[in-house]
Image: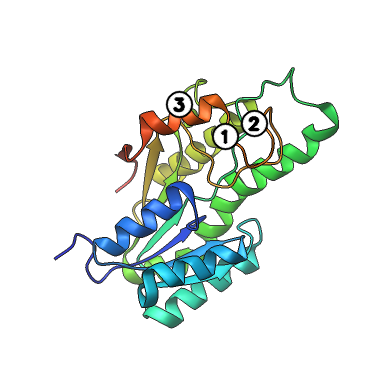
Amino acid sequence: MGWLDGQVALVTGGGSGIGRAVVARFIAEGARVGVLDRVPGRAEELRAEFGDAVVAVTGDVAQLADNKRAVAETVAEFGRLGIFVGNAGVFDNFLSLAEFPEEMLSEACDELFGVNVKGCILGAKAALPELLKADGSMVFTASVAGSNSGGGGPLYTASKHAVVGLIRRRAGRHHHRSARTFASGPRPPLAIRRSQYGGAAAGQQSAADRAGARRSRRRLRISVVAD
């Protein structure tokens, strides 16, 4: 028997990186999992690897309609939704504000905050009605960058502080009548979907990323924020 036997989860950004590891572990523990990922090829990869235990939806976490569609397709396939994992994220490759090309800065802010912050808010909004029915839980990938200044560049760090603010707000005002809320703080942050901005070419890991990956592989610090 697994820890998650009978549970149904929805993981955003579940087609790669930390999200893919979460999907694999949840399924290994007995859960069935819905995934929202913006890269179409990853949906086919997930179905090929996990079969009937996963339903994969292609869409953008920064769009409420796509989040609602992911919830609806997960519930249609598995009958319920008890866990929402707001995980999709974009990393800034530790690029400082002084180094950031000014012609890219506005677009980069929109992308990072759109995925890292707006994606969590819209995903939580879409999942909440089903989570309330199931007395369920929300888990957000908050990152060590949400609690200090050493986990990324200024855009990533600011976005993860915003995610922590969202979690604290839910803990302080809604825990008595809403879904339980948790945070996961991987150390150091890893790119789930790599941004086109940064010192390294798109799709390539920086030396800091590679070193961080070696240190943090399969190490997640889980903290209960609200119960």
The quadrant in which residue 98 appears is top right
Kindly identify which numbered label has been placed on residue 102.
none
Compared with 21, 33 (above or below) is below
What residue does disc 2 label? Answer: 155
Query: Pointer 2: residues within 10 angstroms few (<14), some, or many (20+)?
Result: many
What residue does disc 1 label? Answer: 205
Seen in the image, is 132 located left or right of residue 120? left
* Residue 29 placement (x, y as % from top left): 24, 61
Seen in the image, is 30 located left or right of residue 109? left
Compared with 18, 213 (above or below) is above
What residue does disc 3 label? Answer: 211
Which amino acid lies under the numbered mark 3 shown in the image of this protein? Ala
Labels 2, 3: front one: 3
Q: CA distance from mark 3 to mark 1?
A: 10 Å
Q: As rendered, which of 86 and 40 lies closer to the eye? A: 40
The figure's colour scheme reads rainbow
